[in-house]
Image (cartoon, rainbow, N blue to C red):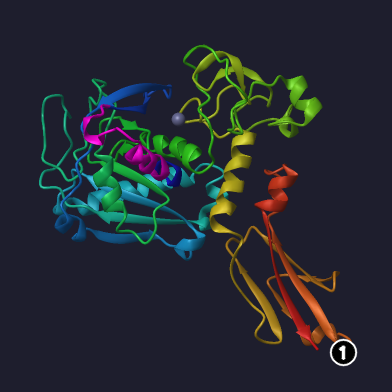
Amino acid sequence: MRIATILCLLLAFLPGTAAAQIARTEWREVFSPDGTIQRVKLTRTPADAPAPRSVIAAADVVPIEVNGPSESRFDLVFVGDGYTSGQFTTYGQHVRSKFAEIMAIEPFRSHRTQFNVWQVNVASPQSGVDNDPYGVNRNTAMDMGFYCGGIQRLLCVNETKAQQYAAQAPDVDQVLALGNSTTYGGAGGRVATASGGNAQSGQVAIHELGHSIGGLADEYEGGNRYTGGEPREPNVSIYSRETMRQYRLKWHAWLGQATPDGGVIDTYEGGYYYRYGVYRPSQNSIMRTLGRQFNLPGREAMIAAFYRETGLIDAASGASTTLWVRPVSSRVTTTWTVDGHYAGQGNALHVPSLRLAKGTHTVTATVTDNTPWVRDPALKRGSLTDTRTWSIGG
Ligand SMILES: [Zn+2]
């Protein structure tokens, strides 16, 4: 989201471009009921119009699940379109079922307490979304509709409005726009969309979170041969298995391991919108087909990203004779040292029990997640470990 914002600002300041006159080309991901994914290019002009301020101010924010302060949580914000003010109960059920679908899959399931979920109640004048069925238009708050770009299941939203409504929540890390429909559909982009009343559509959100949280690339194919340099995403590479092993590159640490999406981690040709010249780590992960699991490198990247967003410690104090830390998750362990020597485990340390010699001592709490799902030493040290240090005595 932040990168998207920066890009928008850059575009706005490009010399000689009058933003209103440019036909914007945007990519959207289209998802089929069988799970396959494609990208389509949409040409849209002019830019999505904003919503009136008075309407936005009237939107209510309902906390669905709040696990901690927004500064140290990943905040998912649902906005709904085509729900009248009398349909917020239905909307709430749709939000909860989509959230449940996200949390049913790893690594979300094991890291649930690192998320907050907010539901923004946006009242639409009419119920339903455009082109559901084709040709029927409805007056709704965020202009959602099927047949976007001429594709039936591509459910588009006015992203400007969706983001304006979402901004009513205490913090926004990902916007998920639900349309009041039971027809299969969704779209991937800055704002992920899904049919609120369709049981399969929540898979779209999981795939999109792979992009927005984990920085994962798409593993599905498209055109011919990839001829570019090594992609920066952790789950696509131009390197062969042998090169990865030899130089300890990309997913070398996972090669040969059984992966949750089936088979073993290797270098499978095809992905990143190309058929040849680029490899993916597994045969068929959720970054390639909806309804699947993340593969091992994908899961590792996601977990590291969760902790980069939330940190590992919500609060800590050295104000009394008992020092303590409050971690973001019960998954992490806290190890205490005094002057570099092991002094115990757990979230609190009672200093008088240590019977320390007179003088000043340095106490350190090291909080870490020792999950076997992260192998990269740099990630373990950097993203999955945090410390607090106090100077005591004297
Ligand atoms: Zn994608």
| Location of residue 360 (image quadrant) | bottom right
Q: Residue 9: give x, y in percent of width and height.
A: 37, 43
Give the side of residue 15 with respect to residue 257, left or right: left
56, 137: nearer the viewer? 56
Q: Name the residue at 29% across, 42% down.
A: 178
Quadrant where the N terminus lies?
Answer: top left
Task: Name the outermost residue toward the front.
Answer: 16
SS class, disc 1? loop
Q: Which residues are magenta?
A: 5-23
Looking at the rendered structure, the kind of residue marked 1 is: Lys
Residue 92: tell me if it is visible: no
Q: Measured along the vertical axis of the image, is residue 347 above or below residue 162?
A: below
Q: Residue 96: give x, y in percent of width and height.
A: 36, 50
| Location of residue 38 (image quadrant) | top left
Residue that mark 1 sits on: 358
Dominant secondary structure, magenta: helix
Q: Name the residue at 87% across, 89% down.
A: 358
Give the side of residue 309 with respect to residue 46, left or right: right
Q: Is residue 359 magenta?
A: no
Dot 1: few (<14), some (14–19), or many (≥20) neighbours within 10 Å?
A: few
Q: Is residue 18 magenta?
A: yes
Q: Residue 7: give x, y in percent of width and height.
A: 40, 39
Q: Ligand 1 lies in which image quarter?
A: top left
